Image (cartoon, rainbow, N blue to C red):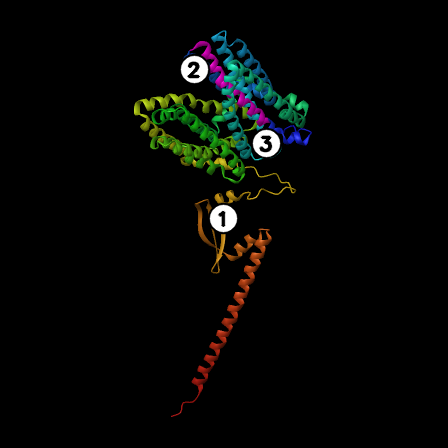
């Protein structure tokens, strides 16, 4: 799928940053409304049950619309959907600010509509990123990691700004600010992000594009589920995201608050632990964005889950020291930063563009289904087994889940098949320093070795032996080396051949000298035998 390229070079370079900036603005506004709307419900009704109903209604609408509206998004186009959804979201936020005080039923309806529009805005921006990366020829994992860091930072800013806005302007004022943020996000998409469909239609011809019929809604929806069902890697990744969200929610709403309440008796520690994890994710995203093109995806994901998963839970059962908790949580966040960008990059690279909205909606819906279950199940476990036993059981289960990529390694190693994209072949731009170093160290490696006058070959993948050392005929070894058009290798081969020739000549001269000496001795012996014996 081709993408329209802006005429101005600086606008072409600004397309991806402009899109990520629009997402960041939306995240900041979303965090503000996440705090402001429940606060509005609480101060107008005084009922925590109604707070939960409003939040649940918006979340349910968000999840379901991501799946059910995906065929419509394909028909309208991702860029148009993003702009229209952001504009409509601004209108809905304004309606909540104007009418939210007057009726609970109206607030529920507007909150559900806001969830529907927010899902379409988020999914369409997510889908726009793929054609932009294709056009730029950039590395999927690196962009995903940088985007993850920006959005995490935006989440922290949004939560902080939201609290300040509510204190300064009240809940209504904060909702008005959220409405403004949607307009800013729409403007960024309009100005910076080109339309992927326009160049595709130009390349295919307007008549061919017009002749392409749209699938019926139910057929398109069924096609998304069929595609998802036939992709084992996507199903495995989605299942892992479901359990990851479940355990993360259990930690955030039950385990960490229970530990703070029973050990420190201070709610200040809640913010400290949460900030440690978020800052670790942000710092790790910066590092991973730099290293992403050089790392095998499968190894990065398994390492992230093993080191950043279960240990983050286990520490709450074995330590009462806040400093230790903060350090482990920060390091876990740094390591876990490799998971989401890796999965996101594989989805971008593996799912065809026309199927991305539908497959992405299904993945998001299943992954988010673990969030409401996490808090409920964690509460039941702690109530039945106690805090320490509940955390230990959760740590064990989380570790068992993270073993899935190892147990089913044949499926999960397909992460590497959709590997990192090599840099564009531009002779005027040098490759990054160390490019491919980690992939060469951890990926397949065949070693041809010469020692003690004999050639051998063996093969490894990381620490795993693929083929044990075995002898190779010298002619085959030299023929293989001659195919490597690297001056240093050719010089080393010539030096080796010359040295072998010199050694062979020396050995031949030594053998000739030895043979001459033996002939001389044999001639003396023969002469002695022919001489007459005196009586």
Any part of residue 155 in sight? yes
**Magenta residue check for 76:** no
Residue matched to label 3: 133
For discs 3 and 1, the disc positioned in front in the rendered view: 3
User: 458 or 491, which lies in front?
Assistant: 491
**Image quadrant containing the N terminus:** top right
| Left or right side of 105 for 137 | right
Spatial CA distance of label 3 from label 2 is 39 Å
Q: Give the percent coordinates (x, y) of residue 430.
A: 62, 43
Q: Give the percent coordinates (x, y) of residue 331.
A: 44, 35
View extreme (bottom): residue: 535
Residue matched to label 1: 446
User: 137 or 305, which lies in front?
Assistant: 305
The disc placed on residue 52 is 2
Spatial CA distance of label 3 from label 1 is 33 Å
| Left or right side of 241 for 174 | right
View extreme (right): residue: 7
* Residue found 46% across the figure and 34% down from its top: 334
Of labels 1 and 2, earlier in sequence is 2
Of labels 3 and 2, earlier in sequence is 2
Magenta-highlighted residues: 19-46
Q: Is residue 278 above or below residue 436?
A: above
Disc 2 element: helix
**Image quadrant containing the C terminus:** bottom left
For discs 1 and 2, the disc positioned in front in the rendered view: 2
User: 154 or 436, which lies in front?
Assistant: 154
């Amino acid at each position: 799928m081709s993408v329209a390229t802006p005429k101005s070079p600086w606008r072409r370079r600004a397309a991806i940053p402009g899109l990520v900036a629009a997402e960041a603005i939306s995240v900041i506004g979303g965090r503000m409304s996440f705090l402001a709307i429940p606060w509005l419900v609480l101060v107008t009704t005084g009922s925590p049950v109604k707070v939960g109903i409003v939040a649940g209604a918006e979340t349910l609408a968000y999840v379901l619309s991501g799946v059910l509206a995906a065929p419509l998004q394909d028909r309208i186009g991702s860029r148009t959907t993003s702009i229209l959804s952001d504009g409509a979201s601004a209108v809905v936020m304004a309606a909540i600010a104007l009418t939210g005080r007057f009726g609970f039923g109206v607030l529920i309806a507007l909150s559900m509509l806001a969830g529907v529009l927010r899902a379409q805005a988020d999914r369409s921006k997510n889908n726009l990123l793929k054609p932009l990366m294709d056009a730029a020829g950039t590395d999927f994992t690196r962009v995903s990691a940088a985007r993850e860091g920006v959005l995490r930072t935006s989440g922290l800013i949004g939560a902080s700004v939201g609290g300040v806005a509510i204190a300064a302007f009240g809940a209504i004022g904060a909702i008005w600010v959220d409405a403004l943020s949607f307009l800013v996000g729409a403007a960024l998409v309009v100005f910076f992000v080109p339309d992927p469909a326009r160049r595709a239609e130009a390349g295919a011809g307007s008549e061919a594009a017009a002749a392409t019929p749209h699938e019926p809604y139910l057929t398109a929806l069924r096609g998304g589920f069929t595609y998802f069902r036939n992709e084992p890697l996507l199903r495995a990744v989605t299942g892992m995201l479901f359990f990851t969200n479940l355990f993360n929610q259990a930690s955030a709403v039950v385990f960490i608050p229970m530990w703070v309440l029973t050990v420190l008796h201070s709610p200040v520690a809640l913010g400290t632990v949460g900030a440690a994890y978020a800052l670790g994710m942000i710092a790790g995203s910066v590092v991973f964005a730099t290293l992403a093109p050089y790392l095998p995806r499968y190894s990065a994901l398994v390492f992230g889950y093993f080191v950043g998963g279960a240990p983050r839970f286990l520490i709450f059962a074995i330590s009462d020291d806040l400093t230790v908790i903060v350090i482990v949580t920060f390091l876990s966040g740094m390591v876990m930063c490799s998971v989401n960008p890796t999965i996101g990059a594989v989805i971008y690279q593996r799912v065809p563009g026309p199927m991305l909205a539908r497959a992405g909606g299904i993945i998001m819906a299943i992954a988010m289904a673990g969030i409401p279950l996490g808090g409920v199940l964690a509460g039941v476990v702690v109530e039945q087994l106690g805090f320490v036993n509940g955390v230990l059981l959760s740590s064990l289960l989380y570790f068992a889940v993270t073993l899935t990529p190892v147990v089913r390694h044949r499926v999960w190693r397909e992460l590497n098949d959709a590997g990192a994209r090599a840099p564009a072949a531009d002779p005027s731009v040098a490759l990054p320093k160390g490019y491919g170093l980690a992939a060469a160290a951890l990926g397949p490696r065949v070693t041809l070795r010469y020692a003690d006058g004999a050639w051998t070959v063996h093969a490894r993948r990381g620490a795993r032996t693929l083929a044990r050392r075995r002898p190779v005929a010298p002619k085959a070894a030299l023929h293989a080396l001659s195919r490597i058009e690297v001056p240093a290798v050719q010089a080393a081969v010539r030096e080796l051949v010359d040295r072998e020739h010199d050694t062979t000549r020396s050995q031949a001269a030594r053998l000739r000298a030895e043979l001459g000496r033996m002939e001389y001795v044999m001639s003396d012996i023969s002469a002695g035998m022919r001489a007459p014996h005196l009586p």
